[in-house]
Structures are given as C-alpha cells and as structure tokens.
Image: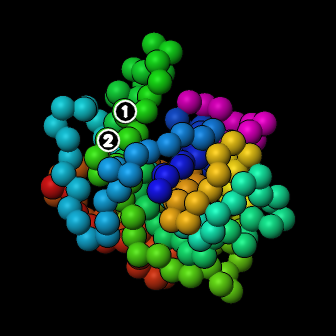
Amino acid sequence: MKIIAVGKNYEEHALEFDGTSGKPENPMIFMKPDSAIMKNGKHFYLPDFMGRIDYEAEIVVRINKLGKSIPARFAYRYYDAITVGIDFTARDMQRGFIASGAPWDLSKGFDGSATLGEFVPVEGRDMNNIDFSLTINDEVVQKANTSQMLFKIDEIIAYISRFCTLKTGDLIFTGTPAGSGPAAIGTHLKGYIGEEKVLDFQIR
C-alpha cells in the first residue's frame, strides 16, 4: 500500500506557502510510508524534536483496483471512496531542507503524519464539486471545494499512474487549501465532507 500526495494543488495555499501562482505543467508529487498512517479517533502526539508541525486538511482518495497508465477519462473507475485526512508537516524541517536543496521526505513522512478519517462512497457524487472543511475546537480553519484544485482528481490519477502502478488500497492525498497552520497540544480536530463529519481526533 502506497500513500501518494500532491503539493501546492490549491492556488491560495501555494501563495501562502511560497508566493507561487498559476497551474504548473505537472502536479508536485511526494510519498509517505505506510507507518505514517494514523486511523480516525486516535490521538496525534506532537513530536517535540521536529520544530513546528503544521496541519493540512485534504481530500483523500482510496484506489480500488490495479491500474497503470490510466487515461484521465477512465480514472473514475479506479477509486471508490474518499475521506478527509491531515497531512501533518514538520514545517521548520521542510523549509530547511528546501533551502539546502535536500529532499524533504522526513518532514512529511514521520509516524502519524497521515491522519485518515472514515471513508465514504463516491457513488453519486460530483468529484469536482465536493465541499470539505476542518475545524479546530469547533472553529473552521480550512474550508474549500474540489472545484478549486489546480489538478483535478482524475488528472492526478492519470499522471501518477504513468510512473507507478496503482494498487488496491493505495491512498492519494490531493492537496490542502489555504488556512493550514501550526498544530497545538490540547486541540480537537474534526474534518467534514459537506455536513458529514468523517474525521475526529485530538492532539496530545
């Protein structure tokens, strides 16, 4: 099982991250190990040796069949469920790695850095018009619609599958909108697809 993620897939987040704007030629892809997965309801324990850790709420897509070099027009056949997940990022480490020209995998792939909510079926949903949000202590901190993605879900699947075979159970984190920020001990995070709560956990 692979965890594949997309960086800077919402223009407003790209602007707040490094000031870039517009749709690039290709999606920015990175990966997380399976040890990064944290299931819904489990506490996230903030690492005390990695500096600032940011939350990034994202729509996560679950792959349901084997696929290679999938045309975008057929990509909808290869996933069956979505949820809200958190791509936790060690921001200080990431910026340091970027400044030095080094890979920044460790800032994204540490244990517990891929929080997953409960999956809901995609059947009957318009995947290019899905509202999702994240609250912290019941205050909305991130809110977006998949129509705002620079690269839509089917485009992402087509692009990734050119390079690596997608397998049943693989997960794709599709990028975070504006509003990501530092995680704090003692906070309660909830993720929603529309009005349906799919993610609920606390930071310790």
Q: Nearer the viewer, residue 75 or 48?
A: 75
Query: Which x, y percent locates residue 53?
Result: 31, 41
Q: Which residue is mark 1?
A: 106
Q: Nearer the viewer, residue 166 or 110?
A: 166
At horizontal 59% and vertical 71% (from top left) the residue drawn is: 64
> Callout 2, which amino acid?
Phe
Asked if residue 97 shows in the view, the reply is: yes
At horizontal 60% and vertical 31% (from top left) the residue drawn is: 19
Q: Which residue is mark 2?
A: 110
Which element carries disc 2, helix, strand or loop?
loop
105 to 74, vertically: above or below: above
Which element carries disc 1, helix, strand or loop?
helix
Query: Which x, y percent locates residue 185?
Result: 18, 52
Query: Which x, y percent locates residue 31?
Result: 50, 43
The part of the chain drawn in magenta is 18-27
> Callout 1, which amino acid?
Leu
Q: Is residue 95 left or right of residue 122?
A: left
Q: Badge 2: few (under 14), some or many (20 or more) residues near its Cα, within 10 Å?
A: many
Query: Which x, y percent locates residue 49?
Result: 18, 32
Q: Quadrant of residue 27?
A: top right
Asked if residue 149 shows in the view, the reply is: no
